[in-house]
Image (cartoon, rainbow, N blue to C red):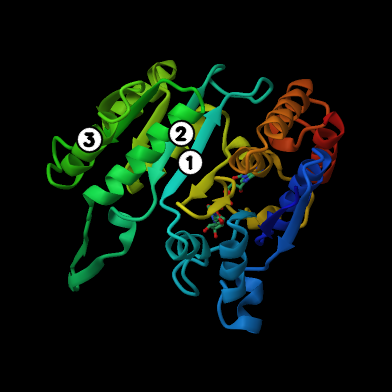
């Protein structure tokens, strides 16, 4: 079977890590026809938008895409392509597994956590205004439908991956309407999945617990803002952004991408770590049903990092992005 997959290299370090990822995925033997689509600042002049319609069409057609990071100019310029993609394709679930790899310097050794973040509402919906010149407001809107949908995603993911517990994270003691509704909706879904243990934590307590006792947690489900913050906290627990993969998933379409950004200062230097994008490809392979290939890539990444000979600077090594990708491919 041939899979058609949209590949968006992105900008900054995106093209280099995308090339390394492709070398690795092609080495699995899974037959993928890559459809390369350009998005970001570089296509602005040609198409008048950083997210041309053909990119969205390609993803809608192929149902699966993998992308490198895309720079969002601060203050002026276009809106984030990453946010626009999530919105246009209704990619409501942001999935960020965080696992320790031997050889990655970190304060912890056995982290195995999954962050499931609601991607479409909360304070990120952009419902905000200046009331007067000295007063601004951003509206936090949470719906039962979106909360149940993300809780269902987390519970189903737990089932598929053989995991046992889902923790809903909130601040329902203070925001009784919005976070209270989120918690209630998560509980309603959890009642339909009695095989999965369900509990909840207040977000500030959760942050402390994750630093003190990360082994007590498994999958966390969070509204958008807390999810954004807690996923970076969890990336910190496993040794940083270079090894933190991610996915944005909807009912029809899924887009896989690393947690990190385009690190423009490193662009074109063949220097940065391709692992986060390669591990995003592991999530992608699982998603399309190629679980065995996914597990082989994961094991090859783990072996190359543990050996420490062919790793990038951030992992204490001296080789470049391309060479690390080739070493992982060679292990396959
Ligand atoms: P960043 O993640 O790009 O980089 C921060 C630092 O982390 C880098 O300077 C580097 O030291 C380190 N780093 C990141 N990726 C690495 C890797 N693969 N290997 C080794 N080290 C790595 O964050 P930033 O500087 O805040 O953002 C740069 C741009 O990326 C911004 O325009 C931002 O909007 C964009 N961004 C895009 C996405 C996305 O495309 N989904 C996500 C986050 C940020």
- What distance separates the C-alpha of mark 2 from that of mark 1? 10 Å
Point out residue 82 in the picture as x, y percentages from the top left corner. Answer: 51, 60
**Image: 105 above or below 326:** above
- What distance separates the C-alpha of mark 3 from that of mark 2? 17 Å
Q: Earlier in the sequence, mark 2 or mark 1?
A: 1
Q: Earlier in the sequence, mark 1 or mark 3?
A: 1
10 Å crowding of disc 3: few (<14), some (14-19), many (20+): some
The residue where tag 3 is placed is 188
**Image quarter for residue 127?**
bottom left
- What distance separates the C-alpha of mark 1 from that of mark 3? 21 Å
Q: Earlier in the sequence, mark 3 or mark 2?
A: 2
Point out residue 265 in the picture as x, y percentages from the top left corner. Answer: 67, 55
Point out residue 27 in the picture as x, y percentages from the top left corner. Answer: 83, 40
Front label number (1 vs 3): 3
The residue where tag 2 is placed is 157
The residue lying at 45 percent from left, 27 percent from top is: 159
**Image quarter for residue 229?**
top left
Point out residue 41 in the picture as x, y percentages from the top left corner. Answer: 61, 71
Q: Is 132 on the left-hand or right-hand side of 150?
A: left
The residue where tag 1 is placed is 95
Q: Secondary structure at mark 1?
A: strand
Q: Are marks 2 and 1 in contact (CB under 8 Å)?
A: yes
Residue 248: assigned label: none
Report the front residue among 297 and 44.
Answer: 297
Q: Is residue 319 visible?
A: no
């Amino acid at each position: 079977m041939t899979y058609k997959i949209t590949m968006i290299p992105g900008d900054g370090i995106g093209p280099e890590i995308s090339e390394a990822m492709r070398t690795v995925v092609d080495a699995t033997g899974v037959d993928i026809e890559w459809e390369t689509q350009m998005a970001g600042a570089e296509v602005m002049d040609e198409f008048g938008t950083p997210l041309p319609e053909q990119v969205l069409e390609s993803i809608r057609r192929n149902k699966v895409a993998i992308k490198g990071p895309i720079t969002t100019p601060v203050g002026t310029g276009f809106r984030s392509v990453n946010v626009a993609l999530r919105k246009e394709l209704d990619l409501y679930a942001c999935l960020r597994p965080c696992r320790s790899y031997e050889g990655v310097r970190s304060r912890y050794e056995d982290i195995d956590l999954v962050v499931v973040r609601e991607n479409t509402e909360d304070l990120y919906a952009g419902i905000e205004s200046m009331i007067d010149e000295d007063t601004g407001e951003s509206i936090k809107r949470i719906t039962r439908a979106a909360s149940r949908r993300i809780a269902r995603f987390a519970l189903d993911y737990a089932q598929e991956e053989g995991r046992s517990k889902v923790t809903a994270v909130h601040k329902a003691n203070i925001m009784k309407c919005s976070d209270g509704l989120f918690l209630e909706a998560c509980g309603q879904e959890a009642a339909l999945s009695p095989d999965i243990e369900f509990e909840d934590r207040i977000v500030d307590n959760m942050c402390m617990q994750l630093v003190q006792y990360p082994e007590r947690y498994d999958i966390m489900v969070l509204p958008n803002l807390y999810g954004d913050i807690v996923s970076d906290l969890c990336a910190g627990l496993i040794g940083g952004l270079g090894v933190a993969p991610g996915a944005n998933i909807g009912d029809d379409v899924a887009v896989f991408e690393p947690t990190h950004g385009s690190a423009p200062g490193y662009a074109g230097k063949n220097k940065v770590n391709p692992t986060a994008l390669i591990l995003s490809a592991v999530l992608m392979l699982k998603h399309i049903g190629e679980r065995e290939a996914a597990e082989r890539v994961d094991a090859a990444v783990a072996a190359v990092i543990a050996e420490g000979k062919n790793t990038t600077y951030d992992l204490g090594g001296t080789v470049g992005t391309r060479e690390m990708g080739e070493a992982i491919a060679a292990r396959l």
